Amino acid sequence: MDALGDSIMSLRTSFPYFFPEVALALGLIVIIVAGLITRDKLALSVVAAFVFGTALTLTVLDWSAYATSTLLFNNMLKSDQFSGYLKLIFDASGILTVCMSLRDVKQQKRTAEYYALLVAVVLGAHLLVMSINFIMVFISIELISLSSYVLAGFAFSRRGAEGSFKYFLFGSVASAIMLYGFTILYGLTGELSFVAPRFAEEVVGNKSSLLFFSALMALAGFLYKIGAAPLHPWAPDVYEAAPIPVIAFFSVVPKLAGIGVLTKFSIALSSMAHPLYDWQNTLALIAILSLIVGNFSALWQRDPKRLMAYSSIAQSGFLLVGISAFSAQGLHFLLFYATIYAAANFLVFVYLQYFDSRGFASLESFSGIGKTALVPSIFILIGLIALTGLPPTAGFTAKFFVFSSLWESYQLTGKTTLLWLLIFGLLNTVVSLFYYIRIPYYAFVKHGSGSAEANFLRFENLFGLLLVVVILFLFFNPGLLMGWINKINFVP
């Protein structure tokens, strides 16, 4: 009876910290019911946006409650400011995706199932960044993955079905490897919660190679979710075949959710240092591999969507730089980078969708478009410059922050791997300029027959203006956001 009473008490005390997730779960049901009443695209979009807006509002209103880390539901989840901040990005990304979906002329009939799947992915992302238990991590990743497999095929084309199937195959293998790694870690430590004191004690006391390889297997699931090398081969085909709003959504929400849980997992394993298998060096090597594979593969792309797929792989490497620093400052800068990355990525994709709807399917087709569609061309240029990491965009500030934290970590530890990561990161930033600037090069320098009507009051321009203001303003005043982020603690 005591155990049952403790479980009931845990449910009662946990529920007040769980309102945003409850709102998403109820919203998912509401969207499905709304789909039985109406098939109107606008009405369903409004309902979905309202659901995401409600979750975002509840997170903001409960922000003071995140100041103290709180274990929920018998230590399955943890409510803290780190997960709360990422949830704000997820909810905002959901709203932006709904807006993009509303303007997707190639998919006029958006069904309730489509919006329900978007909500399911965001709900899974909420749960994943809160998860501190291996079982809950697996359930959350599967909620994200299963919904994503279906969304990837929502173009309802042969190529879309092929991309969705490849996504499913890679995801299934990665999940199986991850689950096996979790099983071995549980057997070695006797703990399902990777933030429990016993788990840390067993990690420190156990220097066997099996512990390292089981952690690597667990890492496979996280790398698949963030699209980092070597678990990246699914990304180009999925990005090429899926609807552009879905691609924009995938490039932010599942990726940052995976980064969030990988951060917590890495903090738990931070004590696992050994000359043969150092966890910090492992993450640094994966970051280097992701940077090289993503950036150099992107150089050969002619399809804008495949180019952005390899860009996403490279950006995973830059996000891993923040984790590899293994410092509170590095994680603060990681959150800043994640915010700017989300804004810049959506800015680029909203205009890729705009041009794609007008038949611009290759980089060469953008030739001369800067003369007839000036505002879209300028805005996509700003988004691409931000992803490159050049001033006067906050992308420069974000990369400067994460590299500075990496340099400080190298000075403290003297690990050669961190120095190589810093060098490769800076060199790959230069390499990325050569493919990010190709669309603006064709648009403003090359001559062509491409044309698009000039309408300055178009929805895309209003949408883009909001993101451009954020990206430019945070370059000149990054302290406005960093002042908030610096108050976030990372107690495991």
Image (cartoon, rainbow, N blue to C red):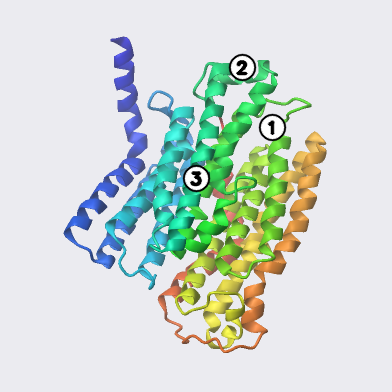
Circle 1 is placed at which residue position? 279
Secondary structure of the residue carrying tag 2 is helix
Mark 1 or mark 3, whichever is nearer to me: 3
The first of marks 2 and 3 along the sequence is 3
Secondary structure of the residue carrying tag 1 is helix
The one of 413 and 321 positioned closer to us in this rendering: 321
Q: Position of residue 52 (x, y in %)?
A: 35, 53
Circle 2 is placed at which residue position? 202
Q: CA distance from mark 1 to mark 2?
A: 15 Å
Secondary structure of the residue carrying tag 3 is helix
The first of marks 1 and 2 along the sequence is 2
Give the amino acid type for the residue marked by disc 3 in the picture: Leu
The first of marks 1 and 3 along the sequence is 3
Q: Position of residue 71 (x, y in %)?
A: 44, 27
Relative to 471, does residue 105 appear above or below in the rendering? Answer: below
Circle 3 is placed at which residue position? 169
Q: Is residue 194 left or right of residue 204?
A: left
For the residues labelled 2 and 3, say whether their Cβ atoms are less than 8 Å apart: no
- Quarter of the view holding residue 143: top left
